Image (cartoon, rainbow, N blue to C red):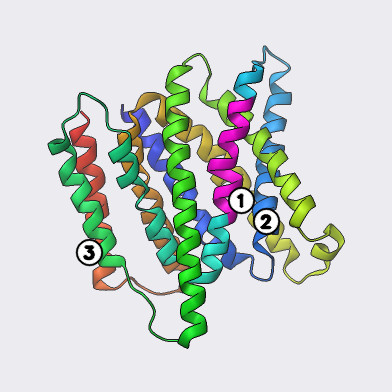
């Protein structure tokens, strides 16, 4: 159980990077950033599969390949495209908080049968209280800024639905297939995601010569590699380990760590300290994780 918890927390730390990636790659469209991330992920996964050919590689069946393709759209290509658009419209903080409610929904929808609701209630209430403290709608900027902000909120909610469904379905699939290792599953998902990212770029992305001529192209490539390999491939390996060892509801609560790290990175990027309410919210999030871990013992 401890290994699963540590893997889930490490995955959250890596996922938090995606909330500052759009700011680091300013001047490049959301489509290009999402496609770059997932092509990098797919290339890494394909490389690992080819490396495995030297030993005894495990190849997916047609049904397993179909599951990887479908879940890659929910948890990666579709989710991240929506999230990048949301961050561009509403900034990093509120999308991070909306995504931070995923633990609540996963806990409610993925509760093990033998676990009482009363045991989950403390962690649930602490998480909701933290989110309430962090919520802050900007008052400046006039009607256009407000319209863009609420458009970003809507996109964040769509991303929330995608990843909540992915968390539940991915956990259920892995627990039904213990013969599939976390690394194999991450690589199968990666190849499927890479294909989706390539199709996204071919359909909606900017031509490569045009991208290469833009200022900051080197930073853009670096961001794509960091979020593609670290926040996608490695994080998926870690999350698969957590999903195989822990219940869906406990895995869901560990996603709060993504919100904590995302806020930490966002504050560091903006060069400012959290407010007192934001500090208090971080404490409540942490206590919510600890309460949920205790409830699942």
Label 1 near label 3: C-beta < 8 Å? no
Query: Mark 3 or mark 1, which has the lower sequence index?
Result: 1
Q: Which residue is mark 3?
A: 280
Residue 188 x %, y %: 63, 28
3 vs 2, front mark: 3
Q: Is residue 77 above or below residue 111?
A: below
Q: Nearer the viewer, residue 213 or 70?
A: 70
The answer to if 77 sits in the magenta stretch is: yes
Q: Residues within 10 Å of mark 1 (few under 14, many from 20)?
A: many
Query: Mark 3 or mark 2, which has the lower sequence index?
Result: 2
Q: Residues within 10 Å of mark 2 (few under 14, many from 20)?
A: some
Q: Is residue 65 above or below residue 265?
A: above
Picture disc at residue 226: 1
Tell me the CA gap for discs 2 and 1.
Answer: 6 Å
Drawn side of residue 53 relative to residue 238, left or right: right
Residue 30 placement: quadrant: bottom right
Q: Specify the segment rendered in magenta.
A: 66-81
Q: Nearer the viewer, residue 272 or 59?
A: 59
Give the structural element (helix, strand or loop) at label 1: helix
Q: Which residue is mark 2?
A: 222
Residue 252 placement: quadrant: top left
């Amino acid at each position: 159980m401890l290994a699963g918890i540590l893997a889930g927390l490490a995955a959250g730390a890596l996922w938090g990077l995606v909330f500052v990636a759009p700011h680091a790659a300013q001047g490049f469209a959301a489509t290009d950033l999402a496609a770059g991330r997932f092509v990098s992920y797919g290339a890494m996964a394909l490389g690992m599969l080819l490396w495995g050919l030297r030993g005894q590689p495990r190849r997916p069946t047609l049904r397993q390949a179909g599951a990887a393709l479908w879940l890659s759209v929910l948890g990666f290509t579709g989710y991240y495209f929506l999230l990048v658009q949301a961050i561009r419209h509403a900034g990093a903080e509120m999308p991070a908080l909306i995504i931070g409610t995923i633990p609540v929904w996963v806990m409610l929808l993925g509760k093990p049968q033998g676990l009482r609701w009363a045991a989950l209630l403390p962690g649930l209430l602490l998480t909701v209280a933290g989110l309430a403290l962090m919520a802050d709608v900007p008052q400046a900027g006039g009607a256009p800024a407000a319209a863009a902000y609420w458009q970003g909120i809507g996109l964040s909610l769509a991303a929330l639905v995608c990843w909540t469904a992915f968390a539940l379905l991915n956990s259920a699939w892995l627990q039904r297939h213990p013969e599939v290792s976390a690394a194999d599953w991450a690589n199968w998902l990666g190849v499927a995601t890479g294909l989706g990212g390539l199709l996204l770029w071919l359909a909606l992305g900017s031509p490569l010569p045009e991208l290469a001529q833009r200022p900051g192209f080197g930073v853009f490539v670096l961001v794509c590699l960091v979020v593609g390999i670290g926040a996608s491939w490695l994080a998926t390996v870690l999350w698969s380990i957590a999903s195989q060892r822990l219940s869906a509801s406990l895995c869901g609560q560990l996603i709060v760590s993504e919100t904590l790290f995302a806020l930490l990175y966002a504050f560091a990027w903006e060069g400012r300290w959290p407010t007192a309410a934001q500090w208090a919210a971080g404490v409540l999030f942490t206590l919510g994780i600890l309460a949920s871990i205790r409830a699942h013992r």
